[in-house]
Image: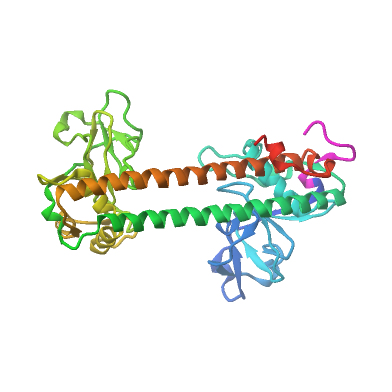
Amino acid sequence: MNDLPSGWKIARLEEVADTALGKMLDRSKSKGHPAVPYLRNVNVQWGKIDTDDLLTMEIPPEQVERFTVRQGDLLVCEGGEIGRAAIWNRPDTIAYQKALHRVRSKGPLVLAYLRYLLEFYSNSGLLARFATGSTIAHLPQEQLRALPVPLPPFEEQRRIVEILEDHLSRLDAAARFMQRAERKLRSLRRAQMQRIVASPKTGRLSDLVERIEAGKSFRAATRAARDGEWGIIKVSAMTWGEFRADQNKAVLEESFIDPRFEICDGDVLVSRANTPEYIGAPVFVRHPPPRLLLSDKSLRLVPRPGVNAEWLYRVLSAPSSRRQMTALATGTKESMRNISQASLLSVEVPIVDEVRQAEVVRTAHELDRVLSRMSTALADADKRARALRAALLAAAFSGGLTERTNVDVEEMAGV
């Protein structure tokens, strides 16, 4: 930013805009006044404001102007993902909370230009250097006001915004397409898994499982186990459809450890306690590190003779099994439900012979390979789109967009 085009200058944000940080009002002193909907930082996303879950507060008329937003104001997150910004483009007035900055132009500044500049600063890491707080980042008002703004003439700012919106709208459309494709891919995986494990003959999980082994609770550190230490797995080790050995805590009471509960290659584990969506989530363990233990929230299912362990895992992953486990879970808190061993063993499952079990496993492996290739392609496309977006923003605030009549974004991104 040191070598700006002719006609550009660097200004502090406070030179070209007024900022006002929201304030948490005392509800006891504002009762009896008109209720006004208000925005929280969770409502402000990059470039858009979500008004689906607005709350309301009663605001005295004399304070409405101080704590409300009008059409054309820029809102900037003070905490959380600092710098996340969007323009309020509706004609109605709305209040805003203390975790948001309200920004109004007072000079030759297009607020949409500033919105994109904040995104560039966030992605490049510059904004983090203006933040305060050791655990939760904050962007105080004095730091926001001190932000350097590379400032081209007003009409050039508008031209930059037009070019950015043209190119970024296409990238946003591509991102939405990839998100839909990823959702469809997950649906396809579930549907295909249900299809390949289906059987006209059914029974209970107790027909397939010889016994269930439950882990126990240990006093543990907040960090993961180091080499040579015993670790105990967390619920997150079994949540995402694959066994994540790094999701563990170091055991502090090694004298009480029972090595019989060490996790082994080929184990089928189930999450006994989790959110409703993931209660009973199964994983098939492949090549775990040594000295890793079952926890009191994990169960090991030991198959009966003639039951293929990986086939059992595939059966438990099928949508029909997952729906039953969710329905059988108990508990009043949505953040953590439980399923008993008896309930788990009552789940209705398909019953097939060993030959068919092996066929299902082979088919599942091929399905995994195909879907994995598709998922990788989507991830690569997303990575490329992010690189293109970063290149556009970098060019915008160095003069690269308006200096070139034909913007080759891919060339700028080096892809």
| 368 falls in the magenta region | no
Viewport quadrant of the C terminus: top right
Would residue 8 appear left or right of 365 to someone viewing this image? Answer: right
How was the colour assigned to the protein in this rendering?
rainbow
Q: Looking at this view, is 196 or 284 the one in front?
A: 196
Residue 335 seen in the figure: no
Viewport quadrant of the N terminus: top right
Residue 218 drawn above or below residue 359: above
| 7 falls in the magenta region | yes
- Give, as a single range, the part of the protein colored magenta: 1-14
Image point (23%, 44%), residue name:
310
Q: Looking at this view, is 300 or 370 the one in front?
A: 370
Residue 266 seen in the figure: yes
**Rendered location of residue 233, percent (x, y):** 28, 39
Residue 182 drawn above or below residue 247: below
Image point (18%, 56%), residue name:
344
**Rendered location of residue 224, percent (x, y):** 34, 32
Q: Looking at this view, is 405 or 282 the one in front?
A: 405
Q: Residue furthest right?
A: 7
Task: Tell me the quarter of the picture where residue 184 sits.
Answer: bottom left
**Rendered location of residue 174, percent (x, y):** 60, 53
Q: Which residue lies furthest to the top in this view?
A: 228
Image point (64%, 42%), residue name:
122
Would residue 21 appear left or right of 57 to someone viewing this image? Answer: right
Q: Looking at this view, is 346 or 114 the one in front?
A: 346
